[in-house]
């Protein structure tokens, strides 16, 4: 039992929420996801869009068939709600493509 007590002090408690570091000058600073537009209305629109566009567009370009989980803004909206809600600016992506290919494109200044 003594070993378990000493181990406990080395484990951080998790609140279950994800912490995202946002640059101080970012348009997102100090805003919740709901304040940035990702509330109930977005979740409903996202579900409909994925139902109508279920495959990852990046994977399709490479001859693969992969279910999409993310509705991505092709051009980063940066708080512009007109661009945010413009479905012509949406694309379906799988999580691996969103987290790698899309992020690399944005870092390189493409699509923004």
Image (spheres, helix red, strand yellow):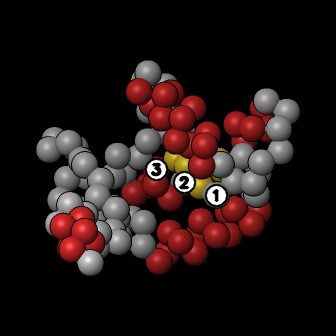
Q: Residues within 10 Å of mark 1 (few under 14, many from 20)?
A: some
Instruction: Give the mark nearest the N terminus, 3 or 1.
Output: 1
Q: CA distance from mark 2 to mark 1?
A: 19 Å
Report how far apart the C-alphas of labels 3 and 1 lie in the structure.
Answer: 21 Å
Residue at the image point whose x is 24% and y is 47% from the top: 22
Say which mark, if any, is on residue 5.
Answer: none
Tell me, for residue 69, which label it has, or none: 1
The answer to which quarter of the image holds residue 16 is bottom left
Q: Nearer the viewer, residue 6 or 44?
A: 6
Task: Compare residues 68 and 50 and report the one nearer the observer.
Answer: 68
Residue 56: where, in percent of width, then height?
Answer: 72, 46
Name the mark nearer the viewer: 3 or 1: 1
The residue under the point 58% across, 75% down is 44
| Residue occupying the point 39% across, 65% down | 37
Give me the disc on residue 86: 2
- Residue 78: % across, % down: 35, 46
Q: Quadrant of residue 1?
A: bottom left
- The residue at which mark 3 appears reads as 83
Observer-side mark, 2 or 1, equals 1
Residue 4 lies, with reference to residue 108, above or below; the image says below
Q: Is label 3 in contact with label 1 (beta carbons under 8 Å)?
A: no
Instruction: Give me the residue at 57% from left, 32% from top.
Output: 101
Do residues under tags 2 and 3 come within 8 Å of each other at their CB atoms?
Answer: yes
Question: N-terminal of the two: label 2 or label 1?
Answer: 1
**Left or right: 38 in relation to 61:** left
Residue 29 % position (x, y):
19, 53
């Amino acid at each position: 039992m003594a070993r378990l007590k000493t181990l406990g002090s080395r484990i951080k408690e998790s609140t279950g929420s994800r912490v995202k570091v946002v640059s101080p000058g970012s348009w997102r600073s100090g805003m919740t996801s709901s304040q940035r537009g990702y509330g109930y209305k977005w979740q409903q629109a996202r579900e409909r869009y994925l139902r109508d566009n279920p495959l990852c567009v990046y994977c399709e370009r490479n001859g693969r068939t992969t279910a999409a989980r993310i509705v991505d803004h092709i051009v980063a909206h940066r708080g512009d709600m007109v661009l945010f809600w413009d479905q012509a600016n949406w694309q379906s992506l799988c999580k691996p493509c969103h987290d790698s290919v899309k992020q690399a494109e944005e870092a390189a200044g493409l699509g923004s």
